[in-house]
Image (cartoon, rainbow, N blue to C red):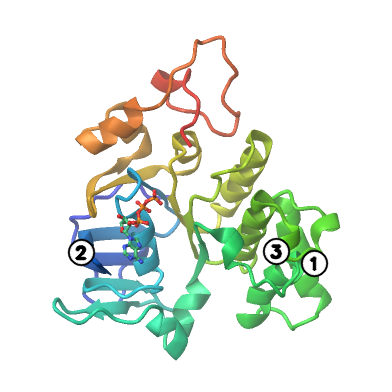
Amino acid sequence: MTGAMTGTEAGPTNGRVPGLVLSARGLVHRYRTPAGLRTVLDGVDLDVREGESLALLGRSGAGKSTLLRVLLALEAPDAGTVSALSPDGAVDPVHDAVEGAALRPVRPHWRSGALRWYRRLVQHVPQDSAASLDPRLTALQAVEQPLVRLGLHRAGSSAARERAAECLEDVGVGAVLHGHRPRQLSGGQAQRVAIARALAPRPALVLADEPVSGLDAPLRAHVLDALARARRTTTLVVVSHDLAAVAALCERTAVVHAGRLVEDRLTRDVLTDPRHEAARELVDALPRLPSSSAPLPSSAPLPSSREDSPHLT
Ligand SMILES: Nc1ncnc2c1ncn2[C@@H]1O[C@H](COP(=O)(O)OP(=O)(O)OP(=O)(O)O)[C@@H](O)[C@H]1O
């Protein structure tokens, strides 16, 4: 597993870059609002290496989800490049935008099918995961779907069903819920179905947007365990406000502030010795409990100086 990297190291020019799974350079993204264009990503450089688990931290509205969506090619940047590891071992462009280009329609690449190789590489746990589930599909079918779409198993095969059931079990969704459609699932159940769906194809890279927010403590621990197991074979990028989850899952943390990466270091260093004001603000906002208060979930230890603090959600 690689250690912390900064976003300032040289990115791929093309061809083979050992260990690099995902690379972004100079990402700019603007939203059109009634008040005019709003810059939400303002020159983001980021490298993610194979086997890493990277947390994206930041205040609400800092641009984390937007960054994830641009990295996923769900939205096109207004400037900058995103490249990813393609099946031939080269790091190939996912986006290559030029400053000044008009705002592009959402999801152009997914629709065109040009990035089929990228869809095989990466899976997404969206922030509103319940809404991301197809209302027509049962929980089991939702998890089987990517296995079939990616050509890993035949539709209706017992192998697809078994893998889907295994992944649902892994995130604490029992057989009793397999036949339930999204409207019959609680928010937390749907969220865990979406996580199982992302992990089922054993992707090389998972980008997860607040995967444990809104889960009760036992379920949160369960899902963190599932993500920690997945991490053995999958590179993880996780957006979270849950600093204990970040400490448990991610060895590297980048702090997003006003559309920029203002800190990018080992998680333990960011959490114990935050340098940028935005990082300090997040860490200092951890509420403190008397030391006799309920302990943190065992799966989610904080650095020693923060052991008396609960997670921030
Ligand atoms: N489709 C959109 N159109 C206009 N503005 C948007 C759109 N999506 C997001 N924004 C704005 O962009 C900014 C960044 O949003 P984003 O969702 O990336 O932040 P975030 O860091 O993920 O926040 P949170 O932690 O609350 O999820 C916010 O000010 C948001 O209001």
Whichever of labels 1 and 2 marks the residue nearer the N terminus, that label is 2
> Which is in the foreground here, disc 2 or disc 3?
2
Name the foreground residue: 293 vs 10.
293
Query: In the rendered image, which residue does mark 2 sit on?
Result: 35
Residue tagged 1: 162
User: Which tag is nearer the camera, tag 1 or tag 2?
Assistant: 2
Identify which amino acid the numbered label 2 is placed on.
Ala
> What is the number of the mark on residue 182?
3
Q: Amino acid at mark 1?
A: Glu
Q: Is 126 rendered above or below residue 269?
A: below
Relative image position of residue 173 (x, y in whole percent): 75, 53
Tell me the CA gap for discs 1 and 2: 51 Å
Question: In the visual, does 135 lie left or right of 78?
Answer: right
SS at mark 3?
Answer: helix
Left or right, residue 139 beside residue 258: right
Q: Residue at x 44, y 45 (%)?
A: 240
Local SS, label 2: loop
Q: How many marks?
A: 3
Front position in the image: 59 or 247: 59
Say which of marks 1 and 3 sits in front. Answer: 3
Q: Residue at x 48, y 84 (%)?
A: 116
The amino acid type of the residue labelled 3 equals Pro
